[in-house]
Structures are given as C-alpha cells and as structure tokens.
Image (cartoon, rainbow, N blue to C red):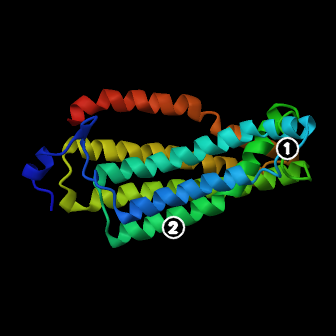
Amino acid sequence: MWTEEKLAELPQVNGFRQRGMDMTRLETFTDAAFAFALTLLVISFDNIPTSMAELNAALKNIPAFAASFLLIAMFWYAHHKWSRRFGLDDAITAVLSLIFVFVTLVFVFPLRLMASAFLSWITQGWVPFELDETSGNVVAYVFVVYGAGFVCMSIMICLLYVHALRVKELNLNSLERFIAKAELQAWLILLSSGVLSTLIATLAPPQYRAWAGLAYAPLGIIMPIWGYWKSRQEPAAA
C-alpha cells in the first residue's frame, strides 16, 4: 500500500509520482523482448552487400526500417512510461505484459512489410516493396495484418491503464487519475485509426484498398489537438 508518506518521497514527472523506479524482472523481460524485435527488423536484410548495386538496394530499405523502428519504439516507450508511473508487478500485469510481448514479436514482420508497402507506394517504387507480388490485393492484405497487430498492441496498453486505474493500493491523486485517463483516451484514438485502416483495407473497393495507410495520417492533427486539450485541463484536475 502506497501511503502519503512514501509517495511524498518519490520523484515526479509532470506531476505524476513515479512508483516504479526500480525495474522488475517483468519489465526487464519486456525490454529484452523489444530489443529482440528490433534485432529481427535488422537481420531481415539479406546478405551483406558485395557490390555498389547491392549496397544501393540495401540503402533504399533504410526508410522502411526507420519507420518500423519508430513504431516499435513508440510501443516500448508507452510500456516503459506505464511501468515507471505505476510500478505494478501483479498477476494481471504479468499476463497483459506477456501478451503484449507476444503480439509485438508477431507484429514485427507485418510492420516491416507495411512500412515498405506504404513507402513504396508514396515514392513510386523508389523504396522497394519486400514481397515479390505487388498487386493491390497483396498490399491490402499487408495492411489488414498490420492493422490487426497495431490494434492488438494498442488494446494491451489500454488494458494496462484500465488495470492501474482500478488498483486502489496505488493511492492515485486526482491529477494522476486525470493523466492516466487522458493517456487511455490517447491510445483509444490510436486504436481507432488502426480499426479504420483495417476496415478500409478489408471493405473498400479493390482500387482504393491501398489507401488504408492514409487512415493513420489524421493522427498528425488529432494528437496535437488532444495534447493541447490535455494541457488545458490539467490545472483543473490538479
């Protein structure tokens, strides 16, 4: 049970007392799994280039790797931030985190394929698509698989926040509960974009299914608006 005396001794980040400053074995395992996922992205390159043509072909894969790296890092940081805020190490946290790791490792290769498909589309083929077949149906299928993984990982982050909000022993104050609920809302927005993309790739007319990747584009506007709203509401919550 976190008492007010113990909580007063904790460091704070943006008003949230960090209950998980000591890494648990579960968090260490999760970090190692994410590091392994990034390794899978790297070793998915073919053999080391032995000519300028092979080197140039390998360099063209860097944008797809960079996009994949950033998305994996986004999910890792979300789990890291959650762990620092709450420091939970109970059975529910273990189950949710293990499912999260499992989905991440399954998600790695569809993520790389999605990145290469989308970047190949917007660069008119300069970034190579890593499948031999490049028809619209194949690209749409890649977006369906990617969207399913994105949605599942977002759901895991949402469930972790729902679980933390229900643990009374954490003794969350009003500001911390507001921040946790706002974070949950943010991940629900991200989850919704994944659902929308998957629906477009599944249900849209074949000639429009490749546009499924653009379902994530509005996040560039929606998330800053959400961040502004959150910053305006925090003083009242405190």
Q: In the image, 159: left or right of 4?
A: right
Q: Secondary structure at mark 2?
A: helix
Badge 2 crowding class, 10 Å Cα cut-off, few under 14, some 14 to 19, many 20 or more, is: some
**What residue is disc 1 on?**
49
Comparing marks 2 and 1, which lies closer to the viewer? 1
Question: Mark 1 falls on what kind of element?
Answer: loop
Residue visible at 59% across and 41% down in the picture: 70
Which of the two discs, 2 and 1, labels the residue nearer the N terminus?
1
Q: Position of residue 108 (x, y in %)?
A: 66, 56
Name which quarter of the figure residue 212 lies in.
top right
CB under 8 Å between discs 2 and 1? no
- Dot 1: few (<14), some (14–19), or many (≥20) neighbours within 10 Å? some
- The residue at the far left in this view is 5
- Tell me, yes or no, if residue 199 can be seen here: no
Residue 123 lies in what quarter of the image?
top right
* Front-most of residues 176 and 65: 65
Task: Name the residue: 20% across, 61% down.
Answer: 168
Judging depth in this view, the residue of 225 and 70 nearest the camera is: 70
| Nearest to the observer: residue 225 or residue 105 | 105
Residue 31 appears in the figure: yes
Describe residue 61's horizontal placement relative to residue 103 as left or right: right
Quarter holding the N terminus is bottom left
Residue identifier under label 2 = 99
Percent x, y for residue 58? 82, 40
Drawn side of residue 72 relative to residue 77, left or right: right
Q: Dividing the image into 4 quarters, which one contains the C terminus?
A: top left
Amino acid at the residue labelled 1: Pro
